[in-house]
Image (cartoon, rainbow, N blue to C red):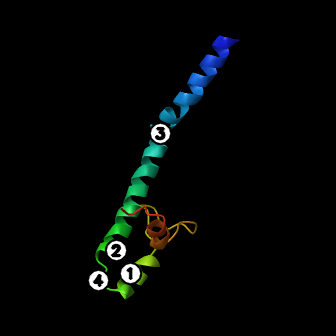
């Protein structure tokens, strides 16, 4: 019984590491980095409040296309993800 609990706990602890190495997860991370880089570039080029406002409403695209549920750059800036 104790051995089963220990093995179950080890499986639960190792599951995130195994999932993180899958090809799909790697693709998602690469797309995520690309989206954040696109938003950073927009804000880096902003020289006025109007430029920042345009960057706020801009929707970055992944390699495929812009998906309706993806947020504009303002959401990433609001949550401090563009640092």
Which residue in the protein does label 4 denote? Answer: 47
Q: Which mark is residue 43?
A: 2
User: Where residue 57 sits: x, y (%)?
Assistant: 47, 79
Answer few, some or many: residues within 10 Å of disc 1's Cα (few below 14, many 20 plus, some between 14 and 19). some
Look at the picture and state if 78 lies above or below 16. below
Give residue 72's mark. none
* CA neighbours of label 4 inside 10 A, class few (<14), some (14 to 19), many (20+): few
Query: Considering the image in quadrants, where does the C terminus appear?
Result: bottom left
Sequence-earlier tag: 2 or 1: 2
Q: Choose top left, top right, bottom left or bottom right for residue 68.
A: bottom right
- Mark before the other along the chain sequence, 2 or 3: 3
Q: Are marks 2 and 1 in contact (CB under 8 Å)?
A: yes
Of the residues under marks 3 and 4, which one precedes in the sequence? Answer: 3
Mark 3: secondary structure:
helix
Local SS, label 1:
helix
Tell me: residue 14, above or below residue 7.
Answer: below
Task: Report x, y in % for residue 46.
Answer: 31, 80
Classify residue 75 as left or right of residue 44.
Answer: right
* Above or below: residue 72 compared with residue 27: below
Can you give x and y, in whole percent of width and height, for residue 56 in the image?
Answer: 44, 77
Residue holding disc 3: 20
Horizontal side of 78 relative to 68 (left or right) equals: left
Which of labels 3 and 1 is toward the front?
1
Residue drawn at the location 34% of the way across and 74% of the way down: 42
Name the foreground residue: 82 vs 29.
82
> At 64% from the left edge and 12% from the top edge, which residue is drawn?
3
The residue at 43%/56% (across/down) is 32
Q: Quadrant of residue 40?
A: bottom left
Q: Secondary structure at mark 4?
A: loop
Badge 1 is on which residue? 52
Q: Residues within 10 Å of mark 2 (few under 14, many from 20)?
A: many
């Amino acid at each position: 019984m104790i051995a089963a609990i220990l093995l179950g706990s080890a499986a639960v602890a190792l599951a995130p590491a195994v999932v993180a190495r899958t090809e799909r997860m790697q693709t998602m991370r690469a797309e995520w980095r690309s989206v954040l880089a696109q938003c950073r570039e927009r804000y880096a080029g902003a020289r006025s409040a109007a430029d920042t406002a345009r960057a706020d409403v801009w929707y970055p695209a992944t390699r495929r296309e812009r998906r309706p549920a993806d947020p504009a750059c303002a959401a990433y800036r609001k949550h401090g993800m563009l640092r």
